[in-house]
């Protein structure tokens, strides 16, 4: 099993949601805030898990989902913010999320059916399969960026 891919989905979703919560402000995005504290190895280098999370965040930037000005050592991305691409995808609606929301006001339905809300719920519940599905949907370039 490719556990690093499950970690990638979790790290990517958590990183993007952190930036979504701060949007449109630029913030420092700390690896430790996403994965918790990881002890460095005997040489003082970040753990593989820490490096994997930082790598996921940098990959997100390279693929156009976030921007940042610099790294803070191996600890964080400084002055990070979502790109338009990520913002539009996170605020887009997930069609299967409308089930059971008919009685709610339109504004609540819009928020609860958004990809951001669905990702947040999957993270909170620890539902790795749902998280993988939603994160892959976020990265699907064939999807429209506006809903």
Image (cartoon, grey):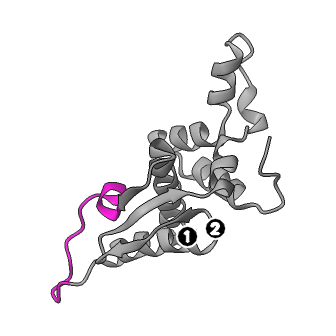
Q: Residue at x 47, y 53 (%)?
A: 14
Residue 94 pos. (x, y %): 73, 39
Q: Nearer the viewer, residue 63 or 140?
A: 63
Q: Nearer the viewer, residue 16 or 40?
A: 16
Tag of residue 64: 2
Residue 66 pos. (x, y %): 55, 63
Q: Residue at x 54, y 61 (%)?
A: 9
> Does dot 1 land on a helix, a strand or a loop?
helix
Q: How many marks?
A: 2
Q: Residue at x 36, y 72 (%)?
A: 49
Q: Is residue 35 visible?
A: yes
Task: Tell me, yes or no, whether the highlighted magenta stretch contains residue 40.
Answer: yes
Residue 42 pos. (x, y %): 15, 86
- The residue indicated by pointer 1 is 61
> Does dot 2 land on a helix, a strand or a loop?
loop
Q: Would you say 147 lies left or right of 38 here? A: right
Point out the stretch of residues depicted in magenta: 30-44
Do tag 2 and tag 1 residues touch (Cβ < 8 Å)? Answer: yes
Distance from label 2 to label 1 (Cα)? 5 Å
Residue 109 occupies which quadrant of the picture? top right
Q: Is residue 126 visible?
A: no
- Circle 1 packing at 10 Å, graded few (<14), some (14-19), many (20+), is some
As drawn, 142 above or below 147: below
Task: Tell me, yes or no, whether the highlighted magenta stretch contains residue 127.
Answer: no
């Amino acid at each position: 099993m490719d556990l690093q891919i499950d970690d990638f989905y979790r790290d990517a979703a958590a990183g993007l949601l952190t930036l979504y919560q701060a949007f449109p402000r630029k913030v420092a995005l700390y690896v430790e805030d996403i994965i918790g504290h990881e002890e460095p190895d005997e040489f003082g280098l970040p753990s593989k898990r820490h490096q994997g999370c930082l790598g996921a965040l940098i990959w997100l930037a390279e693929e156009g989902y976030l921007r940042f000005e610099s790294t803070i050592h191996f600890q964080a991305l400084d002055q990070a913010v979502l790109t338009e691409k990520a913002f539009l995808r996170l605020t887009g609606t997930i069609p299967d999320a409308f089930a059971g929301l008919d009685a709610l006001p339109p504004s609540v339905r819009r928020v609860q059916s958004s990809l951001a809300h669905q990702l947040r719920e999957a993270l909170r519940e620890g539902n790795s399969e749902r998280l993988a599905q939603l994160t892959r949907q976020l990265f699907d370039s064939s999807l429209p960026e506006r809903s």
